[in-house]
C-alpha cells in the first residue's frame, strides 16, 4: 500500500515521539519529579499524631498514638548512617496531637491530648545532655493540634483546639524569661491541624480544619514585625 506524504510525515513524527518516551526511563522520570529516596524504617512503634523537630542535622520524633496507647518515647534519626537511635523519653504524660519547635539548639514539646483531657504543659530537650526540663505552661491554656515554630530566637504557637472550640490566637515564647506573651491572632479563620514551614525568615502557614470544614488558604507571617 502506497502512503501519501501526509501519512508518512505523521508516522515519522509518531515514531520519534515513541523513541523519545522510551528514552525517558521511569527512573529518570522519578528523579525529575522530586527524587524521593526510601530511608531506614522507623524503629519505634508505628503511630500517628507524633511531633518532630530538627537540631544540628538530626531529626527528632516522638509521642503520638498507636491506635491503642498514647506514647512518650523519643527518637533521633541520623541521616549519616541512615539509622534511628532512641533518646530520653519525653517526661510528660504520654500524648498525641502535641506541638513542637526547635530554637537555638534546644527542642520544645508540649500540649496535646492524653486520652482523657487536653494539656498545657511544656518541656525543653537538650540534645547535648540528652535531658528534658519543664518550662512554663503554654500561655493559651490547654490545646491540641496547634501550629508551632521557632524563628529569630523565639518560639511561636497558636491555633488548635481547646477541647471545646477551634482557636486562632497566637503566642510568643521567650526562652530567656521563660514566659509566653499573646500576639495579635492569626489572620485567617480559627482552625486545628494546620501546617507551617519557613523560607528566608518568613513563616508560611495554612490548611487545617475549621469547624469541620477543610481549609486550603495560606498565610505569610513576618517575625520581624510579628504580622
Image: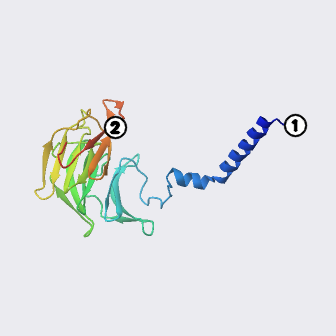
- Depth check, front residue: 174 or 72: 174
| Residue of label 2 | 208
58 relative position to 4: left or right: left
Q: Residue furthest front?
A: 5
Q: Quadrant of residue 221?
A: top left
The secondary structure type at the circle numbered 1 is loop
Q: Residue furthest right?
A: 1
Residue 48: x %, y % from top left: 39, 47
Determine the residue positioned at 33% across, 65% down.
87
Residue 19 pos. (x, y %): 70, 50
Q: In the image, residue 193 lies at what x, y percent?
A: 32, 40
Judge left or right: residue 145 versus residue 29. Answer: left
First of labels 1, 2 by sequence position: 1
* Percent x, y of residue 89: 30, 61
The numbered disc on residue 2 is 1
Residue 112 higher or lower than 85, as above or below: above
Circle 2 Cα neighbour tier, 10 Å, few/some/many (<14 / 14–19 / ≥20):
many
Where on the picture, by quarter, is residue 131? bottom left
Relative side of 197 to 5, left or right: left
Amino acid at each position: 500500500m502506497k502512503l501519501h506524504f501526509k501519512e508518512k510525515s505523521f508516522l515519522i513524527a509518531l515514531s520519534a515521539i515513541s523513541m523519545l518516551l522510551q528514552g525517558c526511563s521511569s527512573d529518570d522520570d522519578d528523579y525529575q519529579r522530586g527524587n524521593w529516596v526510601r530511608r531506614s524504617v522507623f524503629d519505634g512503634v508505628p503511630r500517628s499524631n507524633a511531633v518532630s523537630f530538627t537540631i544540628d542535622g538530626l531529626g527528632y520524633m516522638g509521642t503520638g498514638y498507636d491506635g491503642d496507647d498514647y506514647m512518650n518515647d523519643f527518637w533521633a534519626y541520623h541521616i549519616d548512617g541512615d539509622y534511628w537511635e532512641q533518646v530520653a523519653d519525653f517526661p510528660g504524660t504520654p500524648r498525641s496531637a502535641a506541638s513542637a519547635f526547635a530554637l537555638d539548639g534546644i527542642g520544645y514539646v508540649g500540649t496535646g491530648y492524653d486520652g482523657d483531657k487536653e494539656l498545657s504543659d511544656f518541656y525543653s530537650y537538650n540534645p547535648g545532655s540528652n535531658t528534658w526540663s519543664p518550662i512554663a505552661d503554654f500561655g493559651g491554656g490547654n490545646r491540641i493540634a496547634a501550629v508551632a515554630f521557632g524563628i529569630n530566637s523565639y518560639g511561636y504557637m497558636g491555633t488548635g483546639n481547646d477541647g471545646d472550640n477551634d482557636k486562632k490566637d497566637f503566642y510568643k515564647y521567650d526562652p530567656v524569661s521563660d514566659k509566653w506573651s499573646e500576639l495579635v491572632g492569626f489572620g485567617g479563620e480559627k482552625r486545628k491541624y494546620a501546617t507551617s514551614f519557613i523560607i528566608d525568615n518568613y513563616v508560611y502557614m495554612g490548611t487545617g480544619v475549621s469547624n469541620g470544614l477543610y481549609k486550603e488558604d495560606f498565610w505569610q507571617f513576618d517575625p520581624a514585625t510579628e504580622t
